[in-house]
Image: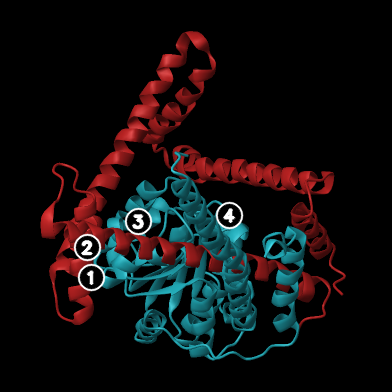
Chain colours: A red, B cyan
C-alpha cells in the first residue's frame, strides 16, 4: 500500500466519484466541486503565465509594444459586465471570430475538402472502390432538392445503411473508450494505491 | 423473462468491476493482433534518423490520461531508442504537466534537458495557435514551461517553422487535435504526422489516414497496447487489454440478455393483437 499522501488523496477522491453509481451523495459532490475548482484555478494560473510569457515579457524586456493591441482587446472583453459600455465587447469578439473563421476556412479547404476529395476519387483497390460507392451513397441520402424515385432510390437507402454502420462503429468505440477510463482508475486503485496489482 | 429485464443496476456495476479487476490481478494473456495503422506508425517512427527533430504534442489532460498516456509513453520509448530530439508542446491547458510526467517516467529522464528534449509548455488559441506554431515555432513558444527563453536551448537552434521539423506526433483526445495539424501544418509544409487518439475519435481521424495526410494512428488503449508490443516494452496498456476484451464480452452478453425478453415480448404482443383482431372480425363488429 502506498505511503504517498497525494496517492491517498487521489484514491479517496476516485472512490468518492465512483460512489455516484450507488446514488448521489455528499462525498461525490465534494469531489466533483474539488475537481471543477482545481481545474478552474489551474486554468487561470496557466492563462496568466501565457499572457506574461507571450506578451508582458516581450513588451518589458524587448520593447515590443505591438502586444498592447491584443492585451487591450482582451481587456475590452470585460466591458460586457458594464451595461452602458457592454457593446464595446463586440469588437474583440468580432476580431476573434474573424481570425478564427479565416484560419479555419483556409485550413479546411485544403485539408478537409480538396485533399479528401482527391483521396476519395483515386481508386486503386477494392477498398477504394467500396469507399467511393459508400461516400456517394451517403451523400445522396442528404440530397433534399428532389425526391429520388425509381431504381435510383436504392442509392440513398444504401447510404442510410452505411451511416448506420458508421454510427454503430462510433458507439462501439465510445464504449471502448469509457471502459478504458474505468480500467485506468481500477489500475490506479489496485496498483498505485493498494499495491495488490503488479 | 421479466426478471431478465429487471436486473438491478448495482448488480451490473458489481459484475463489471469484478470482470475488469479479475484479469488485471491475474492476466489471461488474450492475444493482441497488430493493426495496420499502428504498424504504419511504428514504421514511420522507425524510419527517423538519429538526431531528427520531432515535435510531440501533449494535447491531453488527466481526465483522459488513462487512454492517452500509455500511447504517449510507448511512443516516447520508441523515440528514445531512435535517439531523436523531442520538442514537447501543448495546446491543451493541462498538457505541460502531462509532458513533465511522461518525460520523467520514460528513458527520457536520463537524457539532457534542452539538448535532447524540451518542454515548451502550453499556448492558448486552439487552431489559430496551431497555425501560428506552423509559421513561427520560437515566436509562438517563446519560453519553455519554466519560463526560460526557448531560443536559449541548443535543441531549438535552426528551428523556425514546421518545415524544419521531421515529424509531428500528437496525442490528442479532442480539439486542437490531429485534424488541426493536418489543416494548418500538413497542407503547407507536408510535415509527417502521427496521431494518438481515443477510441471514440478513430472513425473521425481515419479519413485523414486514408488520404495519406496522417501517416498512422494509435486508437485508444488497444493502439497503445499494440505500440507497447512493437516497442517491446509491455506496460499499462497490454496489462489492461484482457480486462477491456472481457468487459466488451460482458456488455454484448448484457445487451443480448436485455433484448431477449423484448424480442419474445414483441412476438407475444403481435400474436395477442392478431388473435384480438380475428376475434373481433369473427363477431362482425368494429374495434
Query: Is residue B65 positioned above or below B250 on the image?
Result: above
Please check whether the numbered discs 4 and 1 fall on a single chain.
no
From the top left corner, tell me how far across and down residue A42 is, in percent.
64, 46
In-image side of A26 versus A122 (left or right): right
Q: Name the residue under label 3.
A: B180
Same chain assignment for discs 1 and 3? no
The answer to whether residue B188 is visible is no
Q: Disc 1 designates what residue?
A: A131
Quadrant the C terminus of chain A occupies: bottom right
* SS under mark 2: helix
Query: The disc numbered 3 marks a residue on which chain?
Result: B
Q: Position of residue A152 (x, y in %)?
A: 13, 58
**Circles 1 and 2: CB distance less than 8 Å?**
yes
Circle 4 Cα neighbour tier, 10 Å, few/some/many (<14 / 14–19 / ≥20): many
> Is there a contact, CB below 8 Å, between mark 1 and mark 3?
no
Which structural element holds mark 3? helix
Q: Mark 4 points at which residue?
A: B94
Q: Distance between the residues labelled 1 and 3?
A: 24 Å
Determine contact: label 4, label 3, CB under 8 Å: no
Disc 1 element:
helix
Amino acid at each position: 500500500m502506498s505511503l504517498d499522501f497525494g496517492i491517498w488523496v487521489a484514491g479517496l477522491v476516485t472512490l468518492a466519484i465512483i460512489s455516484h453509481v450507488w446514488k448521489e451523495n455528499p462525498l461525490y459532490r465534494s469531489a466533483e466541486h474539488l475537481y471543477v475548482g482545481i481545474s478552474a484555478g489551474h486554468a487561470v494560473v496557466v492563462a496568466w503565465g501565457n499572457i506574461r510569457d507571450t506578451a508582458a515579457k516581450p513588451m518589458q524586456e524587448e520593447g515590443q509594444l505591438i502586444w498592447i493591441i491584443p492585451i487591450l482587446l482582451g481587456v475590452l472583453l470585460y466591458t460586457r459586465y458594464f451595461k452602458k459600455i457592454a457593446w464595446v465587447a463586440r469588437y474583440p469578439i468580432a476580431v476573434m471570430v474573424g481570425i478564427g473563421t479565416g484560419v479555419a476556412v483556409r485550413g479546411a479547404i485544403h485539408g478537409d475538402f480538396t485533399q479528401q476529395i482527391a483521396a476519395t476519387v483515386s481508386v486503386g483497390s477494392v477498398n477504394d472502390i467500396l469507399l467511393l460507392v459508400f461516400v456517394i451513397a451517403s451523400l445522396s441520402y442528404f440530397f433534399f432538392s428532389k425526391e429520388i424515385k425509381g431504381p435510383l432510390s436504392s442509392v440513398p437507402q444504401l447510404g442510410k445503411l452505411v451511416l448506420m454502420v458508421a454510427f454503430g462503429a462510433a458507439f462501439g468505440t465510445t464504449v471502448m473508450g469509457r471502459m478504458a477510463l474505468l480500467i485506468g482508475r481500477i489500475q490506479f486503485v489496485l496498483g498505485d494505491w493498494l499495491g495488490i496489482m503488479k | 423473462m421479466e426478471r431478465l429485464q429487471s436486473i438491478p443496476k448495482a448488480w451490473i456495476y458489481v459484475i463489471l468491476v469484478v470482470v475488469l479487476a479479475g484479469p488485471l490481478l491475474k492476466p489471461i494473456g488474450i492475444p493482441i493482433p497488430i493493426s495496420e495503422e499502428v504498424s504504419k506508425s511504428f514504421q514511420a517512427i522507425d524510419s527517423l534518423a538519429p538526431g531528427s527533430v520531432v515535435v510531440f504534442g501533449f494535447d491531453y489532460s488527466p481526465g483522459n490520461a488513462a487512454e492517452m498516456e500509455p500511447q504517449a509513453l510507448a511512443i516516447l520509448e520508441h523515440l528514445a531508442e531512435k535517439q531523436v530530439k523531442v520538442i514537447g508542446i501543448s495546446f491543451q491547458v493541462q498538457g505541460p504537466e502531462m509532458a513533465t510526467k511522461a518525460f520523467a517516467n520514460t528513458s527520457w529522464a536520463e537524457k539532457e534537458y534542452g539538448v535532447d528534449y524540451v518542454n515548451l509548455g502550453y499556448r492558448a488559441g486552439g487552431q489559430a495557435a496551431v497555425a501560428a506554431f506552423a509559421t513561427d515555432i520560437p515566436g509562438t513558444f517563446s519560453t519553455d514551461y519554466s519560463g526560460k527563453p526557448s531560443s536559449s536551448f541548443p535543441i531549438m537552434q535552426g528551428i523556425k517553422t514546421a518545415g524544419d521539423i521531421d515529424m509531428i506526433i500528437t496525442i490528442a483526445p479532442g480539439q486542437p487535435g490531429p485534424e488541426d495539424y493536418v489543416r494548418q501544418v500538413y497542407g503547407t509544409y507536408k510535415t509527417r504526422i502521427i496521431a494518438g487518439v481515443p477510441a471514440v475519435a478513430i472513425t473521425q481521424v481515419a479519413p485523414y489516414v486514408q488520404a495519406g495526410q496522417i501517416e498512422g494512428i494509435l486508437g485508444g488503449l488497444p493502439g497503445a497496447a499494440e505500440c507497447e508490443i512493437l516497442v517491446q516494452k509491455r506496460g499499462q496498456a497490454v496489462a489492461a487489454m484482457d480486462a477491456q476484451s472481457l468487459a466488451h464480452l460482458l456488455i454484448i452478453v448484457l445487451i443480448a440478455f436485455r433484448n431477449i425478453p423484448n424480442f419474445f415480448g414483441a412476438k407475444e404482443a403481435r400474436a395477442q393483437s392478431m388473435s384480438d383482431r380475428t376475434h373481433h372480425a369473427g363477431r362482425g363488429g368494429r374495434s
